[in-house]
């Protein structure tokens, strides 16, 4: 789960992109996210947490089908963003918005609130 969390932090870094658009940076960030999301997916599939500090809800493993579908959609949205190779802010923003939608909707359902 540690790896998952670390990779999720890298994904989080993506949200800090703003201001001047850098197509190389955006492309790299989407590619890093792609790797990180794949690692997260594997991590969630393999590690059912013991009782160490995790905010991942047991529902992820109780009935994984919805969670897995969300993870698959998340990966598909990132793939689409990577393939689109945005060249300016106008083409980047909608792609980023679609990818970001996944974060919130999955967290709302599967991530427990902070203690
Ligand atoms: C399919 C579900 C899912 C998607 C999509 C998802 N996350 Fe998460 N994320 C989780 C779960 C579950 C946790 C809680 C993991 C834990 O506490 O062990 C988490 C934890 C995190 C954390 C906290 C990591 C830590 O150190 O505790 C960050 C940051 C994060 N996600 C960012 C993102 C961002 C940014 C995106 C979108 C770009 C995203 N996540 C997409 C399920 C998801």
Image (spheres, rainbow, N blue to C red):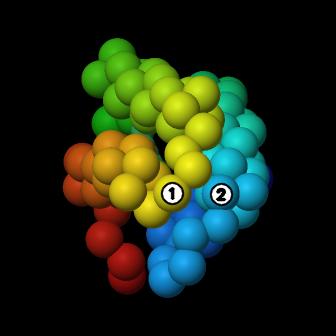
* Total labels drawn: 2
- Quadrant in which residue 59 is drawn: top left
Image quadrant containing the C terminus? bottom left
The local crowd at label 1, few if under 14, some if 14 to 19, many if 20 or more residues have their Cα within 10 Å, is few
Compared to residue 81, the image places residue 99 above or below, namely: below
Label 2, ligand 1: CB separation under 8 Å: no
Residue 53: x percent and y percent?
A: 57, 67
Instruction: Identify the residue at horizontal 53%, vertical 32% (top origin).
Output: 84
Label 1, ligand 1: CB separation under 8 Å: no
Asked which secondary structure carries label 1, the reply is loop
Residue 37: x percent and y percent?
A: 62, 40
Compared to residue 96, the image places residue 48 above or below, namely: above
Instruction: Identify the residue at horizontal 39%, vertical 26% (top origin).
Output: 73
Asked which secondary structure carries label 2, the reply is helix
Q: Name the residue nearer the viewer: 42 or 18.
A: 18
- Left or right: 103 in relation to 6: left
Compared to residue 83, the image places residue 21 above or below, namely: below
- Quadrant in which residue 107 is drawn: bottom left
Give the mark, 1 or 2, whose residue is nearer the N terminus. Answer: 2
Q: Name the residue nearer the viewer: 71 or 32.
A: 32
The residue indicated by pointer 2 is 23
Give the CA separation, mark 1 to mark 2. Answer: 7 Å
The residue indicated by pointer 1 is 88
Residue 56: x percent and y percent?
A: 45, 52
Q: Name the residue nearer the viewer: 1 or 20.
A: 20
- Looking at the image, can residue 55 be seen? no
Residue 19: x percent and y percent?
A: 49, 82
- Left or right: 43 in relation to 88: right
Instruction: Identify the residue at horizontal 65%, vertical 57% (top origin).
Output: 23
- Quadrant in which residue 112 is drawn: bottom left
- Looking at the image, can residue 108 be seen? yes
Residue contact at pointers 1 and 2, CB within 8 angstroms? yes
């Amino acid at each position: 789960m540690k790896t998952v969390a670390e990779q999720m932090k890298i994904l989080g870094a993506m949200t800090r992109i703003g201001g001047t658009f850098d197509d190389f940076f955006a492309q790299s960030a989407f590619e890093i996210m792609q790797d990180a999301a794949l690692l997260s997916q594997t991590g969630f599939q393999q590690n059912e947490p013991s009782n160490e500090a995790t905010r991942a809800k047991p529902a992820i493993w109780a009935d994984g089908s919805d969670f897995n579908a969300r993870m698959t959609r998340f990966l598909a949205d990132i793939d689409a963003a990577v393939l689109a190779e945005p060249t300016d802010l106008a083409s980047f923003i909608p792609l980023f918005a679609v990818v970001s939608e996944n974060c919130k909707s999955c967290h709302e359902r599967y991530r427990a609130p902070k203690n």
